[in-house]
Amino acid sequence: MAGWRLVVMIIVLLLNGLWLGDASAGFLGFGPDDKGKSGLDFNRGYDLNTVGSVSGRVIAQPHQVENEQYIVKVQTASGTLNLSVGPGSYWRKNGIAVRVNDEVSAKGAKAQGLDGENYLLTQKLVNKTTGAAVELRSESGDPAWSSKGAGAGMRSQDNRFGTGMGGGFMRGGGTMGGGMMRR
């Protein structure tokens, strides 16, 4: 009888995790919870209905915030805005030089976090001071650091692509294969 109670409790926990969605999924081991104090999902939260362009002056060096996400803080005509430019590992390898007082323009999806801060999930960033530009997401908002956004990358001043993330495929033999278990 005690064995059945344990099985029922496990099933209830699993169903509860699926019912509540992402917030508890990380707790149950189904995947990471990508939301931090902002409440935003920087990787999958791109909303095409809020896409717009902004210009402003950089007021803080790019720095890491929640969930390895890098932010460039910019002062625009309408206030302070946090430009989300991708995970630190991607930004350090594929980002452009951005310094305090540089004039920048950016295109992306606007969002307000639960922390009261305004964010732009940046699709394209241009440093108007240096002329450097980087595409961080596809036009549909797929991040360049994922396999869906593999076409995005850096562009030079003459609009040629430089190094960017390649679009690799998972090959067989890995630990995440789709094979059958046999006895």
Image (cartoon, grey):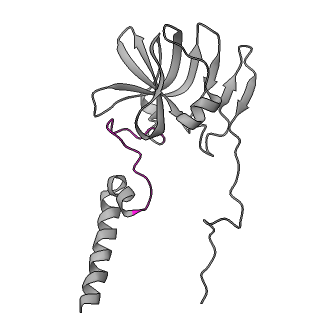
Question: What x and y, as percent, mark residue 154?
Answer: 67, 26
Q: Quadrant of the N terminus?
A: bottom left
Is the magenta region chiefly helix, strand or loop?
Answer: loop
The answer to whether residue 135 shows anywhere in this view is yes
Membership of 34 in magenta stretch = yes
Viewer-proximal residue among 140 and 152: 152
Left or right, 132 with respect to 60, comes to right
Q: Quadrant of residue 81?
A: top left
The answer to whether residue 138 shows anywhere in this view is no
Q: Quadrant of the C terminus?
A: bottom right
Membership of 55 in magenta stretch = no
- For image coordinates 62% across by 21% down, the residue present is 96
Magenta stretch: give its range.
29-43
Question: What x and y, as percent, mark residue 112?
Answer: 33, 29
Question: What x and y, as percent, mark residue 153?
Answer: 67, 30
Q: Is residue 114 above or below residue 130?
A: below
Q: Is residue 6 above or below residue 142?
A: below
- For image coordinates 24% across by 89% down, the residue present is 2
Q: Quadrant of residue 149?
A: top right
Question: What x and y, as percent, mark residue 47?
Answer: 44, 35
Q: Quadrant of residue 30?
A: bottom left
- For image coordinates 31% across by 75% down, the residue present is 10
Viewer-proximal residue among 31 and 19: 31
- For image coordinates 70% across by 53% down, the residue present is 169
